């Protein structure tokens, strides 16, 4: 089936649940309508429900992984490195919308002072935050260059920090009292002209030093009035049920104040590359993800079952070693030119289940790994997995 494709992530995100729930509930609907004894209906109903629950438990990691990947793809759909201002958008209109947002605050004496500093507080509807603060620090400059951008950024951070705790929620339950205060600051810069040396790296610039996307985020937004463009980090954080990211709140503020609620994406080709192939079908993606998250583990289990004791086996970037009816699977990065191989440090068993390994056994296994590669003329270096990933990146 060629539909739906991942270029429609919203539909693709809903379809798995429709398929799974539909497949589980269809037998119930059918049997209820058939003229069969109530006992048979009851058996079919319970069997279908147990099968549905069993499938969801068994494939929970696949369904959640697919949902998160598609949620991120949804965020990429509206993200651009540059936006064109709407036809009716003017600097005066943006100024008016800024002045209507929240309450006015007195800026700090630091230079440059914001043309407008607005503050808004709201209570949190979840237990993940003790409150939500939104700040807009609006600036206007004739020429925006690297030095001016840095001065504005530092000024905005200082003014935003001065407003921490300006208002507090009246009623908080025990969990909310311990939760952090969520803060989002929009640094809005109306630039009549942008220095060409800054213009080429502007998107990269506005994506730097933005803080924590979930709890305390800064989103610089540069409106280039000369070229009628707007540049800011517009990639939203996927919502997966654990609180709404403050970065998303800042993006909503920019959408409302600069664009009047409309992104104006028609013909905008300044897209951000997603991690998924947009022409791939949902069903192919589902099958591939299932193999990677479930099928690969089953293949690894069968591999260990077929291996003999103390047997060491390498395949691509993985090393397998069976030891006392258990096994490890370590990431490896060989370098044929330098005759070296980096091996992930041995810490836990991989088969039959994850659990720590004793220090004496680790030493013996590492000695066997070193001996294996020494015989091939390689020098072995054991490193943490995080370091291994960083070095490869």
Image (cartoon, rainbow, N blue to C red):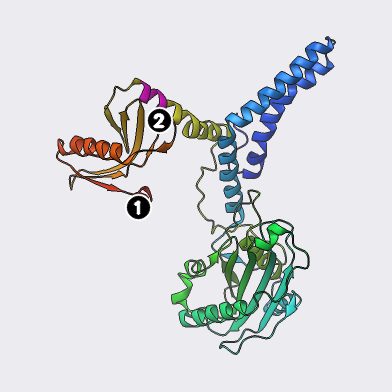
Who is closer to the viewer here, 374 or 368? 368
Residue shown at 66%/55% (left/top)? 243
Quadrant assignment, res 162:
bottom right
Who is closer to the viewer here, 122 or 12? 122
In the image, residue 188 lies in the stretch drawn in magenta? no
Q: Secondary structure at mark 1?
A: helix
Residue 258 seen anywhere in this rendered image of the structure:
no
Q: Where is residue 47 drawn, in percent x and y?
A: 71, 19
82 over 107 or under it: above or below: above
The region drawn magenta spans 301-305
Residue shown at 32%/44% (left/top)? 344
Q: Secondary structure at mark 2?
A: loop
Residue 353 vs residue 170: left or right?
A: left
Label 1: which residue? 387
Residue 228 seen anywhere in this rendered image of the structure:
yes
Label 2: which residue? 351
Residue 64 vs residue 197: left or right?
A: right
């Amino acid at each position: 089936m060629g539909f739906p494709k991942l270029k429609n992530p919203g539909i693709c995100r809903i379809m798995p649940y429709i398929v799974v729930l539909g497949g589980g509930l269809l037998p119930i609907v059918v049997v209820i309508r058939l003229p069969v004894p109530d006992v048979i209906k009851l058996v079919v109903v319970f069997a279908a429900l147990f099968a549905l629950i069993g499938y969801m438990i068994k494939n929970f990691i696949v369904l959640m992984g697919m949902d998160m990947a598609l949620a991120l793809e949804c965020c990429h759909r509206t993200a651009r490195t540059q936006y064109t201002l709407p036809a009716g958008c003017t600097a005066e209109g943006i100024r008016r919308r800024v002045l209507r947002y929240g309450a006015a605050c007195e800026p700090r004496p630091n230079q440059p002072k914001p043309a407008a500093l607005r503050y808004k507080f709201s209570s949190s509807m979840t237990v993940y935050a003790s409150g939500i603060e939104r700040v807009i620090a609006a600036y206007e400059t004739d020429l925006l260059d690297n030095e001016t951008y840095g001065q504005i950024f530092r000024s905005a951070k200082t003014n935003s920090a001065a407003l921490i705790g300006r208002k507090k929620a009246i009623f908080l339950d025990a969990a909310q009292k311990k939760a952090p205060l969520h803060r989002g600051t929009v640094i809005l810069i109306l630039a009549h002209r942008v220095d060409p040396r800054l213009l080429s790296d502007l998107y990269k610039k506005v994506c730097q030093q933005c803080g924590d996307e979930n709890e305390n985020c800064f989103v610089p937004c540069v409106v280039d009035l000369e070229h009628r463009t707007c540049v800011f980090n517009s990639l939203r954080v996927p919502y997966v049920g654990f609180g709404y990211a403050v970065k998303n709140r800042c993006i909503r503020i920019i959408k409302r104040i600069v664009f009047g609620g409309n992104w104006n994406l028609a013909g905008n080709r300044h897209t951000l590359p997603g991690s998924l192939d947009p022409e791939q079908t949902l069903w192919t993606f589902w099958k591939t993800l299932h193999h990677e998250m479930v099928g690969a583990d089953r293949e690894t289990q069968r591999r260990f079952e077929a291996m003999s004791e103390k047997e060491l086996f390498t395949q691509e970037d993985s090393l397998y070693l069976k030891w006392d009816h258990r096994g490890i699977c370590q990431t490896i990065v060989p370098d044929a030119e330098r005759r070296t191989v980096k091996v992930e440090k041995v810490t836990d068993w991989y088969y039959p289940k994850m659990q720590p390994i004793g220090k004496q056994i680790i030493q013996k296994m590492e000695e066997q790994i070193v001996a294996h590669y020494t015989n091939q003329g390689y020098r072995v270096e054991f490193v943490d997995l995080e370091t291994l990933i960083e070095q490869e990146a």
